[in-house]
Amino acid sequence: MSSAGVEISELKPADYQRWDAFVDACPGATFCHRAGWQTVIERAFGHRTHFLMATRGDRIEGVLPLARMRSMLFGDQLVSLPFCVYGGIAADSDAAASALDRAAQERAAELGVDHLEYRNLAPWHTDWPTKELYVTFRKPLEPDVEANMQAIPRKQRRMVRQGMKAGLASRFDDDVDRFFRIYAQNVHRMGTPVFSKHYFQVLRDVFGEDCRILAVHQGDEPVASVMTFYFRDEVMPYYGAGMPLARDVAGYDFLYWELMRRGCEAGYRVFDYGRSKKGTGSYSFKKNWGFEPQPLYYEFQLHQGDKVPDNNPLNPKYQRAIRMWQRLPLAVANVLGPRIVRNLG
């Protein structure tokens, strides 16, 4: 395809380096636009990807990572980007953005999917149906550690100090097995299907030092852990979990403070607390840290489907399934969970 001299093609491994160079330089791009997600989604979940690249001559002017998820339970979707909080078109020219948008819509029609979904930080198609469920929490980091501590509201700051008094300590521990043991138990208590351990290992393998695990301990006792992405000058905690002990010793508060402190000392300037659903505990937790919610614009172009999907745990129709899942033995849940969650995205 071409438009005003712009050519649209699909990403190939030989293009990874220049794709990522464009993403690093493009203000509208995020960690979720990186080329490595193509490998992650295909290797960890087996989904077909359609990472579209807009070029003019040898120069990339825009990218749009897409993946197709097909499921008997959850439908047929073309999404930018599943398993990511952000996505959509990242371009530095109107011609590239328009060409990518048109190519994605044509690809969705050709595939016969139920819908095409963009996960945007800003509105793109105001005439498309949207899902107003999610917000994100982003805030600049102060250059001084103590200034960041003082920026935390007093009540939450007291919780961080409570964790310190409890003798908690943090360290980077990139052992996926240890992280997964905490994560799997945590999501099982919540009644949520767990990702496979393989998925977390693929993230580490693909993104390397830009994907680290920070762990908190009380002596030799594991308390909490978070897998975090690093992009440009941003710290982005992504998958966090804790043991029951974490609530007793302010483990979560201490964990995220340590991540913030370490990020500040390493020269990072933005803390991205990530996505939360409105009205949930994680939403309130992040607000208590002084972060203001920013709306996420999840836009849907309906094709074969007739309504926006509602596949999330807050949907009342899933409450019985959640209670049943919580009663499953952990070992059984760890086997069945990845088969379900691979199609939820």
Image (spheres, rainbow, N blue to C red):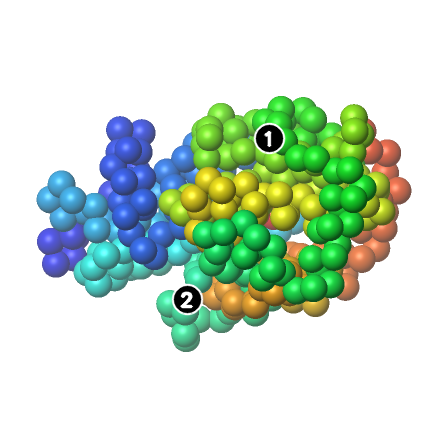
Residue in the picture at 46% in, 52% down:
143
Location of mark 2 (residue): 122
What secondary structure is marked by label 2?
A: loop
Q: Nearer the viewer, residue 18 or 161?
A: 161
Image height of 34 relative to 207, above or below: below
What secondary structure is marked by label 1?
A: strand
Q: Nearer the viewer, residue 259 or 142?
A: 142
Residue in the picture at 46% in, 40% down:
266
- 3D distance between C-alphas at marks 1 and 2: 33 Å
Asked if one can make out residue 198 in the rendered structure from this viewpoint, the answer is no
Give x and y (percent) for residue 111. Answer: 41, 49
Q: Image check: 251 left or right of 197?
A: right
Location of mark 1 (residue): 172
| Res 213 → quadrant | top right
Residue in the picture at 50% in, 60% down:
139
Q: Image check: 44 left or right of 34?
A: right
**Label annotation for residue 6:** none
| Res 128 → quadrant | bottom left
Q: Nearer the viewer, residue 285 or 313?
A: 285
